[in-house]
Image: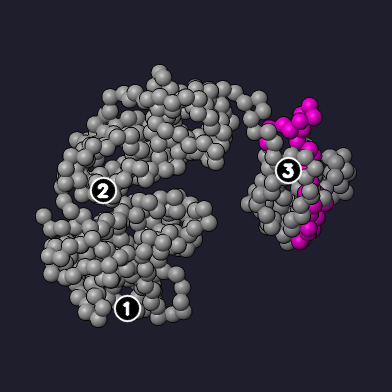
Amino acid sequence: MRFLKYMTAPILMAVLCSFWSCDKDEDKLSEAVLASASTLNFEAQRASEKIITVYADADWVAETPDWVTVTPDSGTGVTDVTISVTDNLRGGTPDNPRKEKIVFKGRTLASHAEVLITQDGDKYRDVKEYTIGEVIKLENETVLSVPEAIVMAVTSKGFIASDATQTGNVYVLNNSTTENVSVGDRIAFKGSKSTDTQSLALVECDILETVSSGTATYPDADDITSKIDKYTSDTRTYIAVNGMLNGNNIVVDGASYSVNITDAPASMDLTALNGHIVYAKGYYAGLAKPVIRIMVTDIEDKGVAKVIYFSEDFEWLDPWAKAGSAGRTVETDDLGATAPQIVSPVVNEVSALDALLTKGYEFLRVTTKTEGECIYLQNNYLKFGKTSYQAGIVLPKIDNVPTGAKPIMSFDWCPMRQGSGTIDPVNLIVIVANGDNEVTFDIPESGFEKGQKLSWIRAEVDLTGIPITKDTKITLRQTQWPAATANRWFLDNIEIAEAP
């Protein structure tokens, strides 16, 4: 049962309306109401009260669920309120967790402030059992139990689960701290249904039990090599692709799209296959144009295609891109696409910047104004600079280039377009430094016309004859350094490989 706690009971409201019109009473409500917290969590039993502040420029009233009490439940201006909850019990034992909103109301919907109240409980009380096929169709946040499933693929963060009848496949994010699984294991698990950014089913699992070990039998894989630029799916289908492995990406000759191996476990040792032709099978994990993601079950080495000394596609930054709701400015030609500062998105208490620094990258920043961050995250690549601020990148140390090699450095880049249609006049350079000895390479300007749609430009630099050791510093930045103008640009898919 729910009820509204307005200033007082409806009877009193009627009395007030007899002295002045209700319209006048509504006029007294605040034009803007804010709360000092957006979420509050309480224990299932004997939960302590919590105090928050309501900010308003006039009167406000509170609407609450019946298990939450707000004191006072109305006020004027800035007011501290105390929030308490009843014990979350059924039959003397904890009931299911619950959550509802308190609404601190002003005159209009735009002036309302909502605070989500959650209370602990027994998540799996009365939980229903489902098959994998049924799990896929459940509403998000449904609590579930799967008594029988088979592990079909393992990633660094979870696994693909199916059943004996292959009625469907679901990705299980393994939050259990006590159990790891292997391909072929028969398992039981409990968790909550969710979907990823591609609207594909997943389960947030926190209870996992291995019943027995065994083997996994796979269906025939749908080979997407010849149709990679057009392929998509709304389920986690079993697919295969043939191409050259570059970092975590499988590149198909003549195709615009590539296939990214997502969350590969360390045991797969993709580094040893870098530059090889491979035939990979696995489960479709979504499309982020121009990249198809796959959770690999098997990868066959078909021989060396080319020698790659360094490669970076930034796809591993995907968790930070999702955390920051980063957009894809170049692919969508959307000047308003979200581009959070690289220090902002945080995953497991680590920022995107810290993650890049840990991999050995360095970043350069200059400005004609006061210091500030001017490097941004996209999904999944980097954006550099803003008006009066320029930035560059220094690659991690590379120590596997033999003497006499003929390496070529390549990368994708794109200048930014201004709101007027003018293309930022970016002049990029690559600087290869061995101590005091520096060699600079000019990258041709984009040649984009005013108003031209954004698109990637492939740049190449022949490094033949230049020693590359663990002490070599390779920098990519602008010549405008510093400048009070807008010289913004995007970077992706860096590679240093032996010339064919």
**Callout 3, which amino acid?**
Glu
Which residue is disc 1 drawn over? 481
Against 60, residue 416 (above or below) is below
Residue toward you, 399 or 396: 399
Secondary structure at numbered mark 2: helix
Q: Position of residue 465 (x, y in %)?
A: 13, 69
Q: Amino acid at mark 2?
A: Ala
The correct choice, above or below, for 311 with respect to 446 in the image is above
Q: Is residue 240 visible?
A: yes
**Percent of width and height locating residue 132:** 47, 25
Residue picked out by circle 2: 272
Q: Quick check: is 412 in the magenta stretch?
A: no
Asked if residue 76 lies in the magenta stretch, the reply is yes
Is residue 162 toward the left or the right of residue 458 in the image?
Answer: right
Magenta-drawn segment? 72-97
Local packing at callout 3 (Cα closer than 10 Å; few below 14, some 14-19, many 20+) is: some
Secondary structure category for the residue under label 1: loop
- Say left or right for 278 vs 35: left
Q: Residue at x 71, y 52 (%)?
A: 106
Which sits earlier in the primary sequence, circle 2 or circle 3?
A: 3
Q: Is residue 25 visible?
A: no
Foreground label between 2 and 3: 2
Image quadrant containing the C terminus:
bottom left
**Distance Cα–Cα, label 2 vs label 1:** 39 Å
Q: Residue lying furthest top in this view? A: 165
